[in-house]
Image (cartoon, helix red, strand yellow):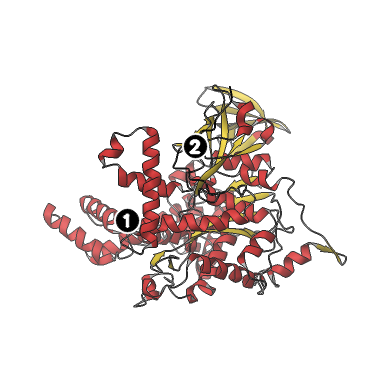
């Protein structure tokens, strides 16, 4: 029977102490050496520790010992126990040595190994030879090997021989003996497979191979959790005017984790930004009747919509913006971000991106495939033929096809899963509609804060004015101004009560243009003297004129840069986005449509005084 021994190391409230005596059935006396005092404590507050175990050499593992070695250890343990219970004199030790078939000094060593707590394992013989980790290489050479491993064992092309060559070079320079390749290989193997893979292929590949991911995303209701992400499409498109290769479009996609329905998406020529996020969320949340009618395909069907409870995404700049957080909080949508460097937390959307590329997009003309090896001699730019409008229609059909194909995880199609979730007892139901669709969409739009002054609102070097803003002129108060970076002709000023007032250019003769077109025009004009010495109004006029020239240049298929063609194409495609969006501006006649010539001063009328 094991009992507590005087001097046994214990832990009490995080303080190391030793057992002295038992005072009552539930209390003992301990000695706190650091404080040089005794203390009476409840037995339940004590935790045993074994400091001496840290000082003992590593012992053999009973689980890996052979059956013969284990039987011998048990026999010796029983013999030592009987010896310790006896007289412990010289004759008893001689008898013990005879039973064990060893010398008396060896028998004494075996007795010293006895550990009541450890049991027969203490009698297992230690492995002969050099201990694990012991080396015969000079410490100076070991230092050189460590340095070579640190600098050379990295990247996909690394090899053991590459590291050894670096070791040889350093050792010859320092005058040290050169270790063998096997010695260097053994030191590399001490890193462990995980660390070797991390240095060779990076954290992502290492996590994919070694990291445990036992969790499963299980959601029983639609719209409970949505995942959103950007991806660049593996296909090159051409511009509408010249049919020359333009770029790979971007897609911002939102998928429902429960039904695997693609709730909404936004395709763009420009790199994803806060506007892409706003358009994707709006498309996912609102009904899509107007969008379907403008696509012009009667076979397309997209009955999925609804306000989500939670949206998961990565840590891209546009996903952590204050605008998105505030809009989501206003509409009671929870936002969740993945831990850095752990893309599998968004496994549903990542898998969808791979499915769309591998099963659909890689069969399009102009596809770039996944990498250079797969592409081979295929010229993606030369074979590209789809315009952005054509690709948008094709992509919409692709999503519908995906919705009606059996999903491996669901065991049915995503559409069937959606219908199952919204059917109960043969009765069909629908998600709730958004009360104010336009207000919902504008809440997620990019914004800036501006003052409503007597001459209107200034934004992106343009003036905006609407008579409805008159009651809200206040030089000391900044208001939220929502805008579309791809169509600057109108902004939306938020006034009291959260209501938005649509506000066009103060000068109605100014044609619509995008921020990217404006930046290109300014870059082209900066070096010109007429721009340097011009006033603010004159500069604005020059920028508008230069943007018009750029559009004419692209339309004429002359020497125009790809950046310029992308800006013009983006501005043209914005017309479709505006037409299907809840934030589409009110119809206004463009300059020239009314029959008036705005370049001439107004005609003076005679007034009777």
Neighbourhood count class around disc 1 (C-alpha, 10 Å): few under 14, some 14–19, many 20 upward: few
Q: Nearer the viewer, mark 2 or mark 1?
A: 2
Quarter of the rendering containing residue 199: bottom left
Using residue 35 as the reference point, say whether residue 255 is left or right of it. right
Q: Nearer the viewer, residue 494 or 81?
A: 494
Using residue 519 as the reference point, say whether residue 486 is left or right of it. right
Task: Report helix, strand or loop for mark 2.
Answer: loop
The mark found on residue 165 in the picture is none
**Quadrant of the frame with the C terminus:** top right
What is the number of callouts on the image?
2
Task: Report helix, strand or loop for mark 1.
Answer: loop
Mark 2 / mark 1, whichever is N-terminal: 1
The mark found on residue 134 in the picture is 1
Residue 203 visible to an observer of this rendering = no
Residue 250 is situated, as x and y percent measured from the top left of the image, at: 49, 59
Residue at 57% over, 27% down: 607
Residue at 67% over, 59% down: 290
Rounded to the nearest angstrom, the CA distance separating label 2 from label 1 is 98 Å
Residue 573 is situated, as x and y percent measured from the top left of the image, at: 51, 58
Q: Which residue is mark 2?
A: 602
Residue at 32% over, 34% down: 534
Residue 164 to residue 10: above or below: below
Residue 138 is situated, as x and y percent measured from the top left of the image, at: 21, 53
């Amino acid at each position: 029977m094991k009992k507590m021994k005087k001097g046994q190391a214990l832990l009490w409230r995080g303080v190391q102490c030793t057992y002295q005596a038992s005072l009552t059935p539930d209390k003992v006396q301990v000695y706190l050496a650091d404080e040089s005092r005794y203390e009476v404590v409840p037995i339940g507050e004590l935790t045993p520790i074994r400091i001496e175990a840290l000082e003992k050499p590593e012992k053999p593992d009973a689980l890996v010992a052979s059956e013969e070695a284990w039987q011998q250890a048990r026999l010796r343990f029983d013999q030592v126990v009987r010896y310790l219970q006896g007289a412990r004199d010289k004759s008893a030790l001689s008898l013990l040595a005879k039973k064990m078939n060893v010398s008396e000094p060896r028998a004494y060593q075996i007795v010293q190994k006895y550990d009541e707590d450890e049991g027969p394992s203490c009698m297992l013989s230690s492995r002969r030879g050099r201990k694990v980790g012991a080396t015969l290489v000079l410490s100076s050479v070991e230092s050189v090997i460590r340095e070579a491993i640190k600098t050379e064992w990295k990247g996909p092309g690394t090899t053991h021989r590459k590291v050894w060559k670096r070791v040889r070079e350093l050792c010859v320079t320092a005058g040290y003996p050169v270790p063998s390749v096997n010695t260097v290989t053994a030191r590399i193997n001490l890193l462990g497979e995980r660390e070797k893979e991390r240095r060779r292929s990076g954290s992502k590949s290492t996590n994919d191979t070694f990291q445990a991911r036992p969790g499963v995303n299980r959601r029983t209701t639609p719209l409970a959790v949505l995942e959103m992400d950007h991806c660049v499409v593996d296909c090159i498109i051409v511009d509408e005017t010249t049919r020359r290769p333009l770029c790979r479009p971007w897609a911002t996609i939102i998928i429902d984790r429960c039904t695997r329905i693609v709730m909404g998406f936004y395709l763009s020529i420009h790199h994803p930004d806060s506007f892409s996020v706003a358009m994707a969320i709006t498309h996912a949340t609102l009904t899509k009747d107007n969008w379907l009618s403008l696509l012009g395909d009667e076979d397309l069907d997209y009955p999925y919509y609804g306000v989500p409870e939670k949206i998961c995404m990565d840590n891209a700049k546009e996903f952590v913006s204050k605008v998105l957080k505030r809009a989501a909080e206003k509409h009671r949508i929870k936002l969740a971000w993945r831990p850095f460097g752990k893309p599998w937390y968004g496994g549903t959307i990542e898998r969808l991106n791979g499915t769309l590329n591998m099963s659909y997009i890689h069969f399009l003309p102009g596809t770039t495939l996944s990498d250079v090896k797969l592409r081979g001699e295929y010229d993606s730019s030369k074979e590209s033929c789809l315009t952005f409008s054509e690709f948008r229609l094709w992509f919409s059909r692709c999503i519908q096809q995906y919705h009606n194909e059996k999903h491996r995880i669901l065991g049915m199609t995503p559409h069937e899963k959606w219908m199952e979730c919204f059917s109960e007892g043969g009765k069909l139901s629908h998600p709730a509609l958004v009360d104010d669709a336009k207000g919902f969409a504008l809440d997620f739009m990019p914004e800036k804060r501006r003052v409503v002054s007597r001459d209107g609102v200034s934004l992106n070097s343009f003036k905006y004015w609407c008579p409805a803003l008159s009651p809200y002129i206040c030089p000391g108060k900044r208001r939220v101004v929502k805008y579309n970076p791809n169509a600057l002709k109108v902004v939306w000023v938020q006034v009291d009560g959260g209501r938005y007032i649509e506000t066009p250019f103060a000068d109605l003769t100014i044609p619509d243009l995008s921020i990217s077109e404006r930046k290109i025009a300014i870059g082209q004009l900066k070096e010109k003297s007429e721009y340097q010495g011009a006033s603010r109004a004159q500069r604005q006029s020059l920028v508008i004129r230069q943007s018009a020239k750029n559009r004419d240049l692209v339309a004429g298929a002359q020497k125009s840069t790809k950046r310029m063609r992308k800006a013009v194409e983006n501005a043209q495609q914005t017309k479709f986005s505006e037409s299907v969006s809840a934030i589409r501006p009110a119809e206004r006649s463009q300059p020239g449509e009314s029959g008036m010539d705005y370049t001439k001063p107004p005609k003076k009328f005679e007034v009777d005084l």
